[in-house]
Amino acid sequence: MEPAEIISHTGGVIGAGWLLIALPLLGAAVLLLGGRRTDKWGHFLGVALAVASFVVAVLAFVQLLGFAPGERRRGVALYEFIPGVANMGLLIDPLSISFALLITGVGSLIHIYSIGYMSHDTDRRRFFGYLNLFVAAMLLLVLADNYVALFIGWEGVGLASYLLIGFWQYKPSAATAAKKAFVVNRVGDFGLLIAIFIMFSTFGSVAFADVFPKAGGASAGTLTAIGLLLLLGACGKSAQLPLQSWLLDAMEGPTPVSALIHAATMVTAGVYLVVRSGAAFFPADSTASLVVTIVGVATLLAGAIIGTAKDDIKKALAGSTMSQIGYMMLAAGLGVAGYAFAIAHLITHGFFKANLFLGAGSVMHGMNDEVDMRKYGGLRSLMPITFVTFLIGYLAIIGFPLLSGYFTKDGIIETAMEHSAILGWLAVIGAGITGFYMSRLVFMTFFGERRWAADAHPHESPSVMTWPLIVLSIGSIGLGGYLILSNRLMVFLGPAVGQPEELPAFHFFSPVGLATLALVALGAAYAWLKYGRAEVPAVAPRGSFLTTFARRDLYGDALNEALFMRPGQWLTRLAVFFDNRGIDGVVNGLAAGIGGTSGRLRRIQTGYVRSYALSIFIGAAVLAGAWFVVGTL
Amino acid sequence: MGETVTFWVLAVVSVTAALGLVFSRRAVYSALMLGVVMLSLAVLYAVQDAPFLAAVQIIVYTGAVMMLFLFVLMLVGVDSSDSLVETIRGQRFWAIVAGLGFASLLALGVGNAVFTAPKGLAAVNQVGNVPSLAESIFTRYVFAFEVTSALLITAALGAMVLAHRERAEAKATQKDLSRARFAAFGETGTNPAPLPGPGTYARHNAIDMPALLPDGKISALSVNRHIARHEADAGTIDPKVAEVLEAQILEGDDSK
Amino acid sequence: MTTHYLVLSALLFAIGGIGVLVRRNAIVVFMCVELMLNACNLAFVTFARQHGNIEGQVIAFFVMIVAAAEVVVGLAIIVTIFRTRRSASVDDASLLKY
């Protein structure tokens, strides 16, 4: 079934959909421009506006449900943005409202959590200002009805991400990580920009409503080019290979940032972009969608491998995030059949990964901001709520039966298996590795001996931090089943992204599902042998070549350094050399020449008026001679 | 014929005087030589139908300007004679080369030109040289003439401003001088009163007669030293005066 | 005859010029300048007669006035310089140089 037509809409909550963006934007403006005056109540304002935005999203969702399924794509025109190029408007349809609910819902929970997490930070108000800015930009990204507005949101989340990764800018590592994220994202943004340019020159418009229907008329080459360039943008934002290197460093930011931006929402913007453009630019069996699946599978394996070797709890989770987004990309590349699974996994991942990150944050909060899992251990009795919610998130992500991840990841694997056995089995292997590294993380943190630092006094976090964990863990338990069973999400999204003619039926314990479960259990058991039962050394052992390979992020940074940084430095040195010797040489040589000549010439100025008079007199004589010669000629 | 003789005589005189002007070591001689050149030129003007200019030349140049030069020479030091040794390398050589080259070029140019017989100013001067000059100056060149007057005033003002010396402190009044005198009396005992005039209390009212103090002694202050020395040399000095002077010399107070 | 006068004028002018270049006493230099002006005047007067035109004499008259003004100011400058530097040599006033 093809996506439905976009119906222009006024009135109601959907008509006032701009409030979704405006509320958090207002919060950002007040908090960032208000300065220290807003320190006392700033975080409450931030939370209130995020929650208000969530309420608007829920109301809009309810209103949307009131329409017939085929009429659920509502375009809300706002104002003329760039005359002749783009009009600002919102597209509120099942896809964008799903994102809006996720962003504002999980965002609100993380806002609340941050009140506790950032309570000791003197810059908490600024933090909430940035968070609100992020929420506004992210909502603009998903609600925009054209690519230019989407790009503005795209850049806005990049900016917020930069500001939040570098929130503790006095730490050189944080400042560097922020810069790295910004620079790597520029590469992806460049692709997205070029894609928008090609769209405008090909279709004469950048609005979804104009571009998607006309896409069929463009040449295959143009479509592939646009698709690949969009994918480049998606890779940058979603930390997919080959632009994955920034995400691990981005963990330098405060943990709520990692949870909100670098796990639940912003990094999924690439998936949103692919799914949103899917029907037009990533049709099934096209080159572009094939590349998407390859990128997805490669990233899901790479992220999982990186996750196995990290001792930093947040970096291990970041590797896991890369891996899970790889699953979503894989699903998004499978065409109509995969979109619903991609979005479902995206939503459930938003819950359980935010749950895991916030749990990790809670652990860090109790452990003096220690991130090295080798210095954790045996925390389950001291942090019961954190432990239980973390455990639920863990079970969800490894795909424990009947929890969220089980439904969504299995859906992806099954769909991939139908599409191509190689993709499917690679995804299964990825699930097995997920079982290993997540189990390793849990065993190292909550079980085993207490390997704490001398001054550590682990304690449970305040309720303002644990309640969001509880809510998120509830989502981690049931949301997957709710969305996947009876194909609820697929049917709901159908009008926005299309749906297959034949709805898939979910088989509990299918052969592939059983194989997956077996591999996951194997991975978990191996982790138990290695990290649960055995003693965990305080210093990481050297390990094999493969371990080093994974610890070094699969040599991604080394590759970037060798391929781009070194040649860039050589080029710079060459330019500097040319500038110093060539350009400066000419300029300085000229100046020195003039200086030397005038230094000699000025000796003529003896100060003796008689010698000046002599030169005048000789001049007069020469003139008289010339006059005489000319006269006689 | 008469003009030719006049010309040749005056030409030789003026060129010789001009060379003397340049090469005499004393500035006064140079000034006198310049006067000779100017007088010769005045005559040559007169010969060439310019009697008014000849008069002006004598009055303004030889009279006023030359006197000004001489005044300044007196101010600056009339005795000083210049060293004629050249200090700037090559200056003299090149000056003479350029001067001679310039002169020979001009002469060559003038000599090459063919002049008809001079028209003469007989026709113009029929009403008189002065009236015809005056007519030209006050009609056609009246503006230049007026500007000239401004120039002269400016020059006069400029000369005054340049020659004016700014006083660094206020001029001492009689009061100040009197205070200074008594201050000196208090410090060194210098007599604040005016010096006694010679012969004030003497029998003779003459410059060579020293003044007598009320007790009849001679006031050493009133002795004219020059006359006393002259009389001492001639042996005609008054013994009383000699006694006072010797006593003063013995005291070592010879300054007064 | 005109040629003779003009050659005399050129000769006096050149002698004056040489004097300006050779002498160091500022007053003598000034006298040489006056000599050059007078040489010019002779040429003007000669040309006036040659062409039967009184204007040559008019210009000579103006030259005399300007020369008088120039002498006044020039001598004042010389006196001022002499007063401060105790010297009338043009070579001594050579501070303004490279």
Image (cartoon, helix red, strand yellow):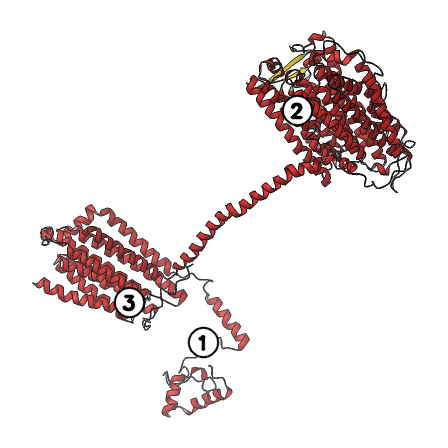
**Distance in Å between CA atoms under marks 3 and 2:** 103 Å
Q: Mark 1 to mark 2: distance in Å? A: 117 Å
What amino acid does circle 3 point to? Answer: Leu
- Taking the image as shown, residue A477 lies to the left or right of residue A176, namely right
A268 vs A163, nearest the viewer = A268
Q: Is residue B86 above or below residue C39?
A: below
**Crowdedness near tag 1: few (<14), some (14–19) or many (≥20) residues, C-alpha within 10 Å:** few
Q: Please state the chain letter of the residue tagged with numbered disc 3 in the rendered image.
A: B
Q: Nearer the viewer, residue B254 or A591?
A: A591
Location of residue A205 (image quadrant): top right
Q: Whole-percent x and y of residue A591?
A: 47, 50
- The verdict on a common chain for dots 1 and 2 is no
Label drawn at residue A324: none
Of all residues, the one furthest to the front in this rendering is A421
Residue sitting at the far top: A68
| Type of the residue with mark 2 | Leu
Location of mark 1 (residue): B194
Q: Tag on residue B70? A: 3
Relative to B134, say whether B166 is above or below.
below
Secondary structure beneath label 3: helix
Q: Quadrant of the N terminus of chain A?
A: top right
- Which residue is found at the position 17% from the left and 60% from the top? C7
Q: Is residue B113 visible?
A: yes
Disc 1 or disc 3, which is closer to the eye?
Answer: 3
Looking at the rendered structure, the secondary structure element under dot 2 is helix
Judge from the rendering whether residue B183 lies leftward or rightward of residue B124; answer left or right: right
Mark 3 or mark 2, whichever is nearer to me: 2
Determine which residue is flagged by label 2.
A231
Crowd class of label 2 (few under 14; some 14 to 19; many from 20; radius 10 Å): many
